[in-house]
Image (cartoon, rainbow, N blue to C red):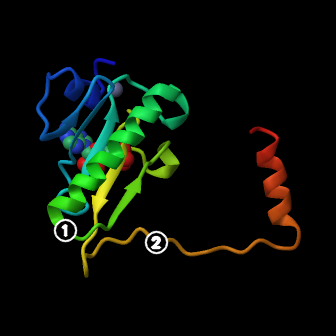
Amino acid sequence: MEECVFCKIVNGSIPAAKVYEDDKVISFLDIMPANKGHCLVVPKKHAQTLIEMSEDDLIATVKAAKKVARALSLSFGNGSFNMVMNNGKEAGQIVNHAHIHIIPRFQKDRLRIKWSHLKYEGDEIKEYAEKIKKFI
Ligand code: AMP
Ligand code: ZN
């Protein structure tokens, strides 16, 4: 994964403003934050999306995300944050190394992570549930 920017941060060949590290996970500040303090929580082992991550890496990454979210809340004081993971091009993933965003939220900040809502017609909601259940 020579070209992967997050692999380069993991192996120390490019710098990052690190806030947490253990044997499986690293967390550092996003260089183009949605709000100041915005952190990325990244499994050290390269995986493109959540689906390709091992259970162990996933558990370690989510645990680290909670630590970072708690630290952000304690540092900035209000306890509000968004935890976002973009998986795949259509979902807006730009860096193809799985990562969780932890974005601190503030009163009157200008960040919008809300979407408009669609409606299911008739039995469509049941059909969607059936389709998904087949692959669980
Ligand atoms: P995503 O759209 O979920 O793939 O987001 C990738 C994020 O990585 C963006 O918010 C970028 O600002 C951030 N990013 C890209 N390169 C770096 C870097 N070298 N150090 C820190 N954050 C980065
Ligand atoms: Zn990588």
Place residue 81 in its image quadrant.
bottom left
Residue drawn at x 26%, y 28% is: 22
Which quadrant of the figure contains the N terminus?
top left
The relative height of residue 18 versus residue 37 in the rendered view (above or below) is above
Q: Where residue 68 sits in the image (x, y, percent)? A: 27, 48
What numbered label is drawn on residue 18?
A: none
The residue sitting at 87% across, 73% down in the picture is 122
Dots 1, 2 in contact, CB < 8 A:
no
Q: Is residue 60 left or right of residue 119?
A: left
Q: Nearer the viewer, residue 14 or 107?
A: 107
Asked whether residue 96 is in view, the answer is: no
Instruction: Look at 52% across and 49% down and name the residue there.
Output: 90
Residue 88 in the figure: left or right of residue 24: right
Looking at the picture, does residue 23 appear above or below residue 93?
Answer: above
The quadrant of the picture occupied by the C terminus is top right
Q: Nearer the viewer, mark 1 or mark 2?
A: 1
Residue to which mark 1 is pinned: 77
How far is disc 1 from disc 2 in space, using C-alphas?
23 Å
Residue type marked 1:
Gly
Residue in view at x 14 percent, y 37 percent: 16
Image x and y of residue 128, in percent: 79, 56
Q: Ligand 1 sits in which quadrant?
A: top left
Q: Which residue is mark 2?
A: 114
Q: How many marks?
A: 2
Furthest-bottom residue in this view: 108
Query: In the image, what residue type sits under mark 2?
Result: Lys
Q: Residues within 10 Å of mark 1 (few under 14, many from 20)?
A: few
